[in-house]
Image (spheres, rainbow, N blue to C red):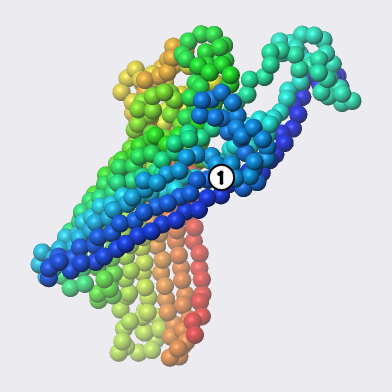
Amino acid sequence: MGTPASDQTPLQEIKGIVAEWRDGFFVLDNWQATRKLTLNIGLRYELPTVPYSVNGQARILNADETALIPNTLPSPGFQFIKANHDNWAPRLGFAYRLSEKTVVRGGGGFYYNPNQTNSFTLSTTNPPFGLSATYSAVAPYNASGCLLSFDDPTPSSCLGGAPAVFNVFRENPYLPTPRMYQWNLGAERELWRNAGFELQYLGSHSLHLDRSYYDNQPTLGPGSIQSRRPNQLWGQIRTIQNDEIANYNGLTAIFRQRMTRGLQVLASYTWSHTLDISSDSNDGGYPVNAYDWHADYGNSNWDIRHRFVASLVYDLPKFAGQNWLVRGVFGHWQFNDITTLQSGKPINVTMSADVASISRAGNQRPNLVGKPSADCNTGHISDCIDITAFATPGAFTLGNAGRNILTGPSYLNTDLSLFKVFPLRERMKLEFRAEFFNAFNRPQLANPNATIGDSFGQIQSTVADDRDVQFGLKFVF
């Protein structure tokens, strides 16, 4: 069978336990200023305490990025960041009655979302935790002629080469609480009895959003990756840092018809636009260029520009006054419909290779050399992205294509159901249900593969099941 070429020691898994208290204090007052005007005024104060290690099994890079702290392990109670004491959140809302049939509402406020304690558990990946050694008996890793065997899988002679440079994790000592400024304005009008129309605007600006900041990213250019790192003491440095932003603007129109003559309708249309830089640090989000997150500011992964949803409930006539056979066959039927129509989600064109040679691959983007376009739908599931609009950038450079600049397949779905009630006695009835999910059996396509390569532009999956039909019988008493 021969002898092993290389092997690796297993990781020692250490459980990190992180805790903090999250306290909130608020005052709120509803003030009927006039017969037509009502004000809602509030002030909230958020007080998250400093996250700390419960069992002391934690280590992070210090603020100067020169050494790992604490020096003594375990150190129960070790605090990861500095305290945050400026989380004031004022709120203001109003409702004004323009007429007996028209109301205007609006408001705004500050909102906070506590830092994720899960991020702090990454402190157990720093030395001396999470260490693994690789032993190799093959060139160019080792040319000394050492031998690996099952009897001696870790001979020191097979560890040759330069001393290890560790990849490390740290938290920015000043980690402000993620904050959102949100505002809204809407008007509601009664159209006729039991029917109304509403127009709403909602906007927000979020800041201090977390990301993984790789602040030891190599400078662009030739040469070994480690030799181009600003801090030669370490390899990759992953810093949790709260410096990203996001923006949202949305306009929604809503029509409501309460149950009248057997018909109930709720229909809404929303136009919205969401912009951000990356997903959160817990989800692995980070900009392509650690030193310039502005280049990644663009459409959010979940940016859906248009969305229409309509639901309908219709009680068919009960045929009261007819004979028992007509009532039994044609009466007590109910028809239900939920239809969703929405535009596609953004497509982010990337490359799998580390063209820029910055030790991170997967989210680097190509150069844009033409007008980008995508036509991805049920009749076009292969080569639905125009690849001629993109080109691989030169070695040691980052591409100029923006993030999420294309749009994927739309989502069109209808769920139908039909109910039939058989009254048995005053408090007893039998209900038959026939339900059809994705009633028209339309393939709900996922985004195509957007990593440049052999399967680029191909749609290979769906985001919802094919038509699903189910029948049920329910006895109510």
Q: Which of 12 and 186 lies nearest the eye of the viewer?
A: 12
Tag 1: Cα neighbours inside 10 Å, few (<14), some, or many (≥20)?
A: many
Q: Residue at x 35, y 89 (%)?
A: 323
**On the rendered structure, is 136 left or right of 112?**
right
**On the rendered structure, is 441 left or right of 149?**
left
Image quadrant holding the N terminus, namely top right
Residue 380: x, y in percent?
A: 40, 35
**On the rendered structure, is 343 left or right of 152?**
left
Q: Which of 49 and 452 lies nearest the eye of the viewer?
A: 49
Residue bearing mark 1: 52
Find numbered disc 1 in the image and state the secondary structure of the residue it sits on.
strand
Residue 409: x, y in percent?
A: 38, 40
Q: Which of 262 and 36 lies nearest the eye of the viewer?
A: 36
Residue 187: x, y in percent?
A: 17, 59
In the picture as drawn, the residue positioned furthest to the left comes out as: 99
Q: Is residue 331 above or below residue 16?
A: below
Q: Is residue 72 above or below residue 219?
A: below
What amino acid type is highlighted by mark number 1? Tyr
Residue 76: x, y in percent?
A: 63, 44
Q: Which of 153 and 477 lies nearest the eye of the viewer?
A: 153
Q: Is residue 271 above or below residue 170?
A: below
Q: Residue at x 25, y 76 (%)?
A: 261
Q: Is residue 86 visible?
A: yes
Q: Is residue 300 visible?
A: no
Q: Residue at x 75, y 14 (%)?
A: 160
In the picture as drawn, the residue positioned furthest to the right comes out as: 151
Q: Residue at x 72, y 36 (%)?
A: 12
